[in-house]
């Protein structure tokens, strides 16, 4: 299976909002409400930011939100802060009962 | 505090073997599915394998099927990944991660990772 499709990079200024897309197929993103998003700072382990499309784990700021429409899921970060600069990965459960990640998106806070 | 600590990474020659360990603490290890995820240098995340709560069911990515074996010792709160017939393309940081019971859906938390380098 090929990775889910994410833009290689996005950028925004502090205080602005950005959206990262994650496109799959009806066998993964479109078929299940099991999309998750992870934040990874350089040299660090990934951190769960959103699970099951739009749920935030305890401790994740409400500036982070998730949604899905058809085969595309989205992560929106509002009120960008310097510490949000990181790589972001989406993932989805698949019809093969496995998990597929996106290729990752590098967020730059200008 | 929930914590996962990997160990066992290192340099190994192509065709060689390595066993990774992941020590869990701060939660009831035997209640959770556990996973291995890897990340090649400068690349994205790739799910590798999962094991159910009591170790009776496992699943693997096609790229490692037949070469890697996931297992767990619930008495020792430890997850393992036995890697055989290693190839250069297996070079990556390997993370263990806690899943939920019943499906491979999301992972939280992750360990800090252990680097495996396959090279002659």
Image: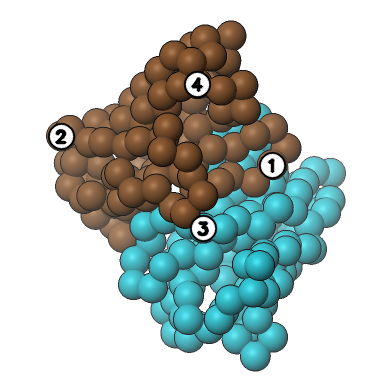
Chain colours: A brown, B cyan
Q: CA distance from mark 2 to mark 3?
A: 26 Å
What number is the disc on residue A80?
A: 4
Q: Are marks 3 and 1 on the same chain?
A: no
Residue B46 seen anywhere in this rendered image of the structure = no
Image x and y of residue B90, in percent: 65, 47
Q: Residue furthest bottom?
A: B75
Q: Nearer the viewer, residue B101 or A13?
A: A13
Image x and y of residue B55, in percent: 49, 82
Count numbered badges in the picture: 4
Q: For the point 49% across and 25% down, which residue is it? A: A105
Residue matched to label 2: A70
Q: Nearer the viewer, mark 4 or mark 2?
A: 4
What number is the disc on residue A44?
A: 1
Callout 3 secondary element = loop
Q: Which chain does tag 1 point to?
A: A
The part of the image, by quadrant, that contains residue A67 is top left
């Amino acid at each position: 299976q090929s990775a889910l499709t994410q833009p290689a990079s996005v950028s925004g200024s502090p205080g602005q909002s950005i959206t990262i897309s994650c496109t799959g197929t009806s066998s993964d993103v479109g078929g299940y409400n099991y999309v998750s998003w992870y934040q990874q700072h350089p040299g660090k382990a990934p951190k769960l930011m959103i699970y099951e499309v739009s749920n935030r784990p305890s401790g994740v700021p409400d500036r982070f939100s998730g949604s899905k429409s058809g085969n595309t899921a989205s992560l929106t970060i509002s009120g960008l802060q310097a510490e949000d600069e990181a790589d972001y990965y989406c993932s989805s459960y698949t019809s093969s009962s496995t998990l597929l990640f996106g290729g990752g998106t590098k967020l730059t806070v200008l | 505090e929930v914590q996962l600590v990997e160990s066992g990474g290192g340099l190994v020659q192509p065709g060689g073997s390595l066993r990774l360990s992941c020590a869990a603490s701060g939660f009831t290890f035997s209640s959770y599915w556990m996973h291995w995820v890897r990340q090649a240098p400068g690349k994205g995340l790739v799910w590798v394998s999962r094991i159910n709560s009591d170790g009776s069911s496992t699943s693997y990515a096609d790229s490692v099927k037949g070469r890697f074996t996931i297992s767990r010792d619930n008495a020792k709160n430890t997850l393992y990944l036995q890697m055989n017939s290693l190839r250069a393309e297996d070079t990556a940081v390997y993370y263990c991660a806690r899943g939920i019971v019943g499906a491979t859906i999301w992972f939280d938390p992750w360990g800090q990772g252990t680097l495996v380098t396959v090279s002659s």
